[in-house]
């Protein structure tokens, strides 16, 4: 399907690899697969899927990327796109089977701890989200910060703090979260 190689893939950035893969460069596509397949397998372990189901999730994630390759707006955030897509697919697979869900009580299943590199990925996503939140500006940044505080205040308290009507908090929150997703490169329309 993909054509002859036209890019050196060893030190290529995601942007270069995605552009070359879009142009039909098989080696660029293979480099992307090599670069991120471990990430996808580690993610599927969190869902405690069988090897066959995990393999299907990984393959489906690569298929989704191939289908959407021309629509990837920020290739440097490809890891997040792949992680989101694989998480959604893992969740879909775990729901159609009788697998325990992440966060459920796994008393009969030994816990080997987080997947290798998971903390690094979580930290990276957290940094991206905090940076995007800072870019939102007021009133969205203040609203989201209030709603994620622990414990979160009631809508009535938020309304009083931000001088808003209680009924406008939910719709405003939704608009702010949509903007946040776009700023963080997690817009659902990309997957």
Image (tube, helix red, strand yellow):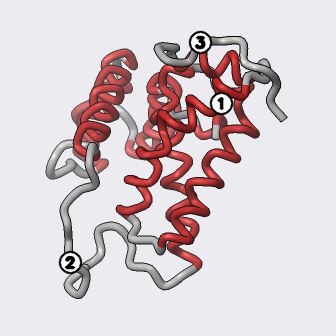
- State which tag comes first along the sequence, 1 or 3: 3
* Percent coordinates x, y for residue 141 in the rendering: 32, 25
Bin the neighbour count of mark 3 within 10 Å (Cα to Cα): few under 14, some 14-19, many 20 and up. Answer: few
Tell me the element at label 2.
loop
Q: Relative to 137, does residue 97 appear above or below in the rendering? A: below
Q: Nearer the viewer, mark 1 or mark 3?
A: 3
Residue occupying image coordinates x 41% and y 44%: 39
Find out whether the residues at labels 1 and 3 contact each other: C-beta distance under 8 Å: no
* Percent coordinates x, y for residue 24 in the rendering: 79, 23
Residue occupying image coordinates x 51% and y 34%: 186
- Residue topped by disc 3: 8
- How far is mark 2 from mark 3, CA to CA? 43 Å
- How far is mark 1 from mark 3, CA to CA? 12 Å
Q: Nearer the viewer, mark 2 or mark 3?
A: 3
- State which tag comes first along the sequence, 2 or 3: 3
Bin the neighbour count of mark 2 within 10 Å (Cα to Cα): few under 14, some 14-19, many 20 and up. Answer: few
Residue 191 seen in render: yes
- Residue topped by disc 1: 29
Find out whether the residues at labels 2 and 1 contact each other: C-beta distance under 8 Å: no
Residue occupying image coordinates x 72% and y 38%: 66
Q: Which mark is residue 162?
A: none
Task: Work out which residue is located at the far left of the displayed protein and give it.
Answer: 150
Tell me the element at label 3.
loop
- Residue topped by disc 2: 110
* Percent coordinates x, y for residue 15 in the rendering: 57, 15
Left/right of residue 162 with respect to residue 136 in the rendered view? left
Bin the neighbour count of mark 1 within 10 Å (Cα to Cα): few under 14, some 14-19, many 20 and up. Answer: many
Foreground of the two, 50 or 147:
50
Find out whether the residues at labels 2 and 3 contact each other: C-beta distance under 8 Å: no
Left/right of residue 148 with respect to residue 23 in the rendered view? left
């Amino acid at each position: 399907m993909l054509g002859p190689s036209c890019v050196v893939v060893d030190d290529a950035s995601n942007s270069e690899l995605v552009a070359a893969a879009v142009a039909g460069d098989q080696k660029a596509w293979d480099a992307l697969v090599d670069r991120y397949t471990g990430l996808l397998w580690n993610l599927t372990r969190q869902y405690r899927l069988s090897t066959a189901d995990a393999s299907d999730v990984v393959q489906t994630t690569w298929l989704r990327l191939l289908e959407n390759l021309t629509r990837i707006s920020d290739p440097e955030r490809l890891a997040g796109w792949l992680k989101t897509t694989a998480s959604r697919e893992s969740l879909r697979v775990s729901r159609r089977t009788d697998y325990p869900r992440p966060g459920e009580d796994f008393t009969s299943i030994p816990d080997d701890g987080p997947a290798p590199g998971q903390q690094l990925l979580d930290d990276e996503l957290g940094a991206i989200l905090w940076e995007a939140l800072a870019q939102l500006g007021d009133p969205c940044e203040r609203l989201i910060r209030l709603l994620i505080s622990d414990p979160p205040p009631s809508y009535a308290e938020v309304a009083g703090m931000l001088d808003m009507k209680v009924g406008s908090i939910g719709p405003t929150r939704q608009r702010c979260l949509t903007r946040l997703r776009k700023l963080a490169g997690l817009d659902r329309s990309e997957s």
